[in-house]
Structure formats: structure tokens, C-alpha cells
Image (tube, grey):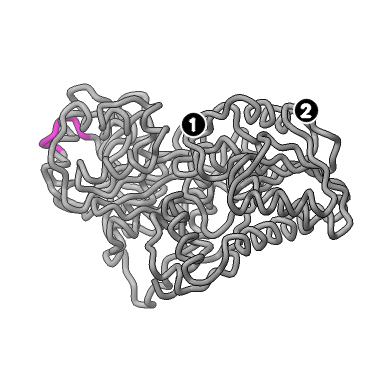
């Protein structure tokens, strides 16, 4: 994998174990990797808390605990006051060697469930990335104690109790202030509960050679900041597509208006709206650049479909006869489409083939309905759910939520590292639909439009949230979307 960028690649735990084995096969001893991990953790601790003079390291029985014992030994050698609390009476393999080194050099160890000693920084080295069940026994008691004490916690590799492949947090799970990850980013650190439990994230590849990474392909990639290229000077509105936003049943005109305005702000040349007649005046009054049309029955939609190059179906559409009729007529047109909200709910009730260039943007509840499962099941493995949807509907899928995921039918996966809890407000999904539709209209592929659009949307929300997350409105994103798509922010 030439040009491997460790900061933007995500792996499963099985892939990281394979990288560990490959590094050892390449001549790096396991104990050397453990010492490198401990050194990287100590460096991260020094950067984050330079004034700290006392540590408490909580160690489990496996290699994550070995990293902790090695860190404790290195920290003692540098003059820090170090206490260790261990969940097991012995370790094996390289972890046993690290434990022996700590004790041989004068370290003192207590056995859990002893009370945690006071320390300026606590280190979580209980489980790491290999856990696939809820912690119990002494380990659970130790994790609860770590969460109860008031001082910062540095997690080694992955917070103990976090499922590294999915971002699911078992109970209990360490709430880390910061996490230093080893070898490669674990994909669950960036979605579901991962970000909440990891805190500030940093990565050390332990100086593993590039040739080792070349033997493995990552499971997913992180989105990176991007913008659209500058336009030629002789551009005209016909060069950048015509988006038709379809929705806005009675009482829901704001949804389709926000979708349409988002498409305009991202640069679609023309934006029309097919909606209830009652919404036409308010949309024109609020945003005269849009072209709203009252549509009573599906045949009224035909001339609008003929002029459009991309469809955005679903915001405020409803699921009664009016909405269902427009949905059916729009999908029958076979044009590049973004399907959201009630457009997805209608699809769940009446599955059908979709246009060849189609992007679906479900939240977990909508994804569950499309898959015939529960929201909890979708959230338990967001990666599997997103890939299943992309394969089932032969479309690009954006699964919204903390750490939004983008997948295509061939299994390609990207993860959005931006976004904030302020986005949990009405209209945010309508704006995303318009953003992606506008990018399709400007010539991007469904995959590129979904990736760029998801990133622009989340980054705009982060800029808007600088004034505070609570009270963030979907329309607050517009000014930032315009700046970001032009590379001005």
C-alpha cells in the first residue's frame, strides 16, 4: 500500500494483530514493540500533563497490561512517583517480562480491588483493543474506580470496555481524558461511543516499517478536509446542474426549504422545489433565488423532473398518498438521487430498485427499518449495518450519527471524524441532503459527493458550534458551508 498515511487509515483489531505479527516477523521483538508503546505513552503523557509527578497505572493480565507495566518502569526511571494496581496475580509472555522488569527495578504493586491511590494522572492498561464482552470481576471494579476518581485518565491503545471494532461501549467502560493508540487507528474509536470514551486521540505507529503496512489494506479511511476546485471564469449557471428538491407536506415546508437552500449554498446552478402550494409563498419570501412550485398530483411533477439533473427526495415529504405518489414518480425518472427522511421510510415499506446514481442518508432508526432490524442492532455494529444497506440497495449510504459512515456497494468505507452533539436538532439531515445533491449536480460521483458532503456538513457544524452546541440550528450552517466548499475556512 504505497503512500500509507497512518493518520487517515482505520483497522479492525484482527488487522492490527496481523500487523503486530508481521512486525515481529520483520525482526522487531515483541518486547521491543511493548517498550516502544510504553515510551510513546509516556511521551504523550508528558505532552498532555507536563507538570504531573505522580502516576497510578491500572494493569490487566494481557499485553495491554504489559504496556502498562513497561510504562510504569520507564516513568519510575525518569523520577516519577508510580503506583501499579493489577487485576491478576500473573501475566504471560512479553507482559510477564514487563511486569518482572517493573518489580525488579523496585516497583510496588497492589492487587485489585484495592482502592486506587491518589495520583495526578491515572493510566488505563486493563484491556486495550481485544475485549469483546462486558468487563466483570476485579476488572469491572477497577474500571468503575477509574471513572469515579476526579483526575485525568490516559488510556493505552483503546479505553478498557470499548469494543474497538464497533465503538460500542460495554458497561463499565473507561471514560478517558486522552487515548494513545498503537500501530494503527482502531475503527471503533471514531464512531458510536468511541469519541466520547477516547477523549483526545493520538497515534503512534511504533516505528514499524512502511513495508509491513504495505502487506495489509485498511478496513476504512478517515475523511480529510477538502473543498471544490476554483471555477473557470466563463462559468454559467447551466454548468453546475439543476437540483429538484421534492418534499414539504403540509406543516413541513421548512424541511424542503432548508434542503434547497443548502443545495444553492454549495453551488448548484439552479435549485427548484416541488412542494405543497401553501409553501410556495413562504419559500419565495425567505429565499427568492429558489424556484418553488406547487405540485398537487404526480403528473404535475413531470415537467420539473424533465428539467432537473439531480433529485433530492424526502425532506418533509410525508408518507400519505401525496408523498407516496411524488416519491414513486421521482424514482421512476431514474435520475441521480439523494434519498432521505420519508423517502427512506417509503422505501422501507415498499422496497424497489433505485436509480444507478443514488445516495441514501439514513439515521440509525431509518437504517433499522430498511434492514428490518432494530436501532440497537444497527448501533451495535454501524460498519456492518452501513455495508449491508449499501449492498442491499446497490447505492452509496451515509449512516448519520456520531462518527457518520459512508459505504458503497463494494464495501469501501469512510468515517467522518468531525461533528458535535449540537447537530442533534431538527433540519440537520435536510441540509445534508441538499449538500450532497448539489455536489452530484456539479459532477461528482455518488461516492465522492457523499464523502465530501458529509465532511463539509460536519465541519460547518463544528464551526457554527463555536458559539455553543446547545441551540445550534440547521440554518446556522449555511454561511460556513459556503466558506468551506470554496476553501475559505
Q: Quadrant of residue 318?
A: top left
The tag earlier along the polypeptide, 2 or 1, is 2
Q: Residue at x 13, y 48 (%)?
A: 334
The front one of 206 and 108 is: 108
Instruction: Give percent across and percent down for residue 389.
Output: 26, 40
Location of the N terminus by quadrant is bottom left
Q: Residue at x 60, y 32 (%)?
A: 173
In the displayed structure image, the side of residue 149 where residue 451 appears, left or right: left
- For label 1, the crowd category at 10 Å Cα-Cα, with few meaning under 14, some 14 to 19 and many 20 or more, is few
> Magenta segment range?
295-300
In the displayed structure image, the side of residue 266 where residue 460 appears, left or right: right
Residue labelled with disc 2:
114
Please, which residue is most extreme toward the top here?
Answer: 320
Residue labelled with disc 1:
133
The front one of 58 and 6 is: 58
The front one of 108 and 210 is: 108
Q: Name the front one of labels 2 and 1.
A: 2
Instruction: Give percent across and percent down for residue 353.
Output: 13, 41
Instruction: Give percent across and percent down for residue 255.
Output: 38, 35
Of helix, strand and loop, which one carries label 1?
Answer: loop
Amino acid at each position: 500500500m504505497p503512500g500509507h498515511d497512518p493518520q487517515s487509515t482505520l483497522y479492525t483489531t484482527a488487522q492490527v494483530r496481523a500487523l503486530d505479527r508481521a512486525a515481529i516477523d520483520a525482526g522487531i521483538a515483541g518486547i521491543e514493540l511493548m517498550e516502544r508503546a510504553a515510551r510513546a505513552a509516556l511521551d504523550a503523557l508528558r505532552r498532555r500533563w507536563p507538570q504531573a509527578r505522580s502516576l497510578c497505572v491500572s494493569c490487566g493480565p494481557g499485553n495491554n497490561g504489559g504496556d502498562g507495566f513497561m510504562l510504569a518502569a520507564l516513568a519510575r526511571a525518569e523520577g516519577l512517583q508510580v503506583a501499579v494496581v493489577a487485576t491478576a496475580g500473573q501475566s504471560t509472555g512479553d507482559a510477564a517480562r514487563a511486569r518482572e522488569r517493573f518489580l525488579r527495578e523496585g516497583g510496588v504493586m497492589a492487587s485489585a480491588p484495592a482502592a486506587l491511590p491518589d495520583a495526578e494522572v491515572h493510566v488505563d492498561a486493563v484491556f486495550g483493543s481485544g475485549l469483546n464482552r462486558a468487563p466483570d470481576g476485579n476488572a469491572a471494579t477497577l474500571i468503575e474506580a477509574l471513572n469515579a476518581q476526579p483526575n485525568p485518565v490516559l488510556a493505552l491503545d483503546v479505553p478498557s470496555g470499548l469494543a474497538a471494532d464497533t465503538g460500542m461501549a460495554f458497561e463499565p467502560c473507561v471514560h478517558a481524558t486522552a487515548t494513545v493508540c498503537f500501530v494503527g487507528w482502531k475503527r471503533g474509536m471514531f464512531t458510536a461511543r468511541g469519541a466520547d470514551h477516547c477523549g483526545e486521540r493520538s497515534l503512534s505507529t511504533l516505528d514499524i516499517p512502511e513495508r509491513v503496512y504495505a502487506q495489509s489494506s485498511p478496513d476504512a479511511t478517515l475523511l480529510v478536509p477538502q473543498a471544490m476546485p476554483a471555477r473557470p471564469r466563463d462559468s454559467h449557471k447551466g454548468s453546475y446542474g439543476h437540483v429538484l428538491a421534492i418534499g414539504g407536506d403540509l406543516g413541513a415546508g421548512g424541511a424542503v426549504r432548508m434542503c434547497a437552500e443548502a443545495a444553492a449554498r454549495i453551488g448548484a446552478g439552479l435549485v427548484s422545489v416541488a412542494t405543497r402550494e401553501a409553501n410556495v409563498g413562504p419559500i419565495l419570501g425567505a429565499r427568492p433565488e429558489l424556484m418553488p412550485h406547487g405540485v398537487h398530483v404526480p403528473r404535475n411533477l413531470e415537467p420539473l423532473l424533465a428539467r432537473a439533473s439531480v433529485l433530492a427526495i424526502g425532506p418533509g415529504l410525508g408518507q400519505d398518498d401525496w408523498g407516496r405518489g411524488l416519491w414513486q414518480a421521482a424514482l421512476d425518472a431514474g435520475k441521480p438521487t439523494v434519498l432521505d427522511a420519508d423517502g427512506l421510510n417509503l422505501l422501507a415499506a415498499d422496497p424497489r430498485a433505485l436509480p444507478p446514481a443514488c445516495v441514501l442518508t439514513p439515521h440509525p432508526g431509518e437504517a433499522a427499518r430498511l434492514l428490518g432490524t432494530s436501532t440497537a442492532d444497527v448501533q451495535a455494529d454501524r460498519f456492518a449495518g452501513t455495508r449491508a444497506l449499501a449492498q442491499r440497495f446497490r447505492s452509496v449510504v451515509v449512516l448519520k450519527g456520531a462518527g457518520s459512515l459512508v459505504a458503497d456497494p463494494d464495501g469501501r468505507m469512510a468515517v467522518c471524524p468531525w461533528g458535535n452533539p449540537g447537530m442533534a436538532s431538527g433540519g440537520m439531515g435536510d441540509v445534508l441532503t441538499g449538500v450532497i445533491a448539489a455536489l452530484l449536480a456539479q459532477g461528482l460521483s455518488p461516492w465522492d459527493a457523499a464523502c465530501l458532503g458529509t465532511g463539509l456538513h460536519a465541519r460547518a457544524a463544528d464551526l457554527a458550534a463555536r458559539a455553543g452546541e446547545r441551540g445550534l440550528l440547521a440554518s446556522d450552517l449555511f454561511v460556513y458551508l459556503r466558506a468551506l466548499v470554496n476553501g475559505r475556512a
